[in-house]
């Protein structure tokens, strides 16, 4: 008997996306096992999402939030409602191949696997660079390392695993017990962005691994719920705020004071000269959360097995 999996999909005003993408998810679920459960968490939608689910997808379980609580809370509700250890998180704007669950599940034969995510393509077939998250601390920030899909496939096909710093929250399979042990997504990042990045780092620091599977792919459409329903200036501000928060939580005090913080001040002064106040606002919002940052750092240290530097060395050990 196959290991049971529950698919969890947060949704906000995504009736059109559900109609477009849920059939592919149902096909993947049936291909893996007829007992696979799909849960859609409707996060306070004002469109016809719930009616679409009830009339067009009657076999799908619905969890309803009367008001919009945001991505993290929607995921938490879906995972809480799931009765399986393995959870497949998918955004409503993701279209999947039928072998998705079949291809990712074997990673969990290893007891220290926390998550695995597939290759992410856009609608034009272009590879999304955050499919495989390799980072290094350089010149004051955590910078994304470049990689080649051909080389990634060759490494995987040679029998090696591809560690990734974190799995994308809209397309990763994870272990429920570990997610709950980490208390899920940290609320400091609400309403969106960087919560999956932070989750992956916290898992690694506990000694739990995340992987990238380049031979299994999904399509992530270019426009999803956040960009459709939130002003882009606000999105930009929150993204910058959360970048600061993540670095302040995970970098060493020396890295913060001698590198990250001076770089931030230099960038902000330059942005003020061109009257770009959005990022300055993001920095000030991050500063207002310093007490939460200090608390988060303390909690991580209590259970950590690896420092961030040790995690980066372990994840980047594959020679690309």
Image: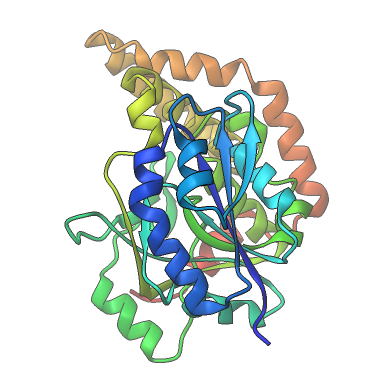
Q: In this view, does 165 lie to the left or right of 266?
A: right
Instruction: Locate residue 311, reporting x and y percent.
Output: 58, 61
Q: How many marks?
A: 0
Above or below for 87 versus 70: below
User: Residue at horizontal 60%, vertical 69%?
Assistant: 36
Q: Which residue is drawn at 57% across and 54% down?
A: 60
> Residue 59's quadrant in the figure?
bottom right
Foreground residue among 12 and 56: 56
Q: In this view, does 173 lie above or below 265?
A: below
Rendered view: 160 above or below 289: below
Figure colour scheme? rainbow
Look at the image and tell me in which quarter the N terminus lies. Answer: bottom right
Between residue 184 and residue 264, name the one nearer to us. Answer: 184
Q: Can residue 212 be seen in this view?
A: no
Residue 34 in percent (x, y) is at: 58, 76
Q: Is residue 289 visible?
A: yes
Quadrant of residue 227 within the rendered picture: top left
The x and y percentages for residue 156 are 40, 83
Q: Is residue 115 left or right of residue 57?
A: right
Kindly give the residue lying farthest to the bottom in the view shown: 158
125 to 149, vertically: above or below: above
């Amino acid at each position: 008997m196959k290991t049971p999996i529950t698919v969890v999909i947060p949704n906000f005003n995504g009736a059109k996306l559900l109609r477009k993408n849920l059939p592919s998810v149902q096909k993947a679920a049936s291909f893996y096992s007829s007992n696979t459960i799909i849960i859609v968490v409707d996060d306070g939608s004002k469109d016809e999402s719930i009616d679409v689910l009830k009339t067009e997808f009657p076999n799908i379980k619905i969890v309803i939030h009367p008001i919009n609580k945001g991505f993290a809370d929607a995921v938490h509700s879906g995972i809480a409602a799931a009765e399986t250890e393995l959870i497949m998180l998918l955004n409503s704007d993701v279209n999947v191949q039928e072998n998705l669950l079949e291809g990712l599940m074997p990673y969990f034969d290893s007891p220290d696997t926390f998550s695995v995510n597939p290759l992410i393509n856009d609608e034009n077939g272009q590879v999304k660079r955050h499919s495989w998250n390799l980072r290094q601390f350089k010149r004051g920030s955590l910078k994304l390392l470049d990689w080649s899909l051909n080389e990634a496939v060759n490494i995987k096909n040679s029998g090696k695993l591809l560690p990734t710093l974190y799995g994308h929250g809209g397309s990763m399979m994870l272990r429920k017990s570990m997610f709950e042990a980490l208390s899920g997504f940290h609320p400091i990042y609400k309403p969106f962005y960087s919560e999956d990045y932070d989750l992956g780092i916290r898992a690694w620091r506990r000694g739990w691994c995340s992987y990238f599977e380049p031979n299994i792919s999904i399509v992530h459409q270019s426009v999803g719920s956040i960009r459709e329903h939130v002003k882009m200036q606000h999105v930009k501000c929150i993204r910058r705020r959360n970048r600061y928060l993540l670095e302040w939580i995970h970098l060493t005090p020396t890295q913060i004071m001698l590198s990250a913080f001076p770089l931030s001040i230099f960038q902000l002064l330059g942005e003020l000269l061109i009257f770009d106040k959005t990022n300055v606002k993001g920095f000030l919002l991050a500063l207002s959360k310093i007490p939460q940052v200090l608390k988060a750092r303390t909690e991580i240290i209590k259970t950590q097995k690896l420092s961030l530097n040790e995690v980066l060395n372990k994840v980047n050990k594959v020679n690309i």
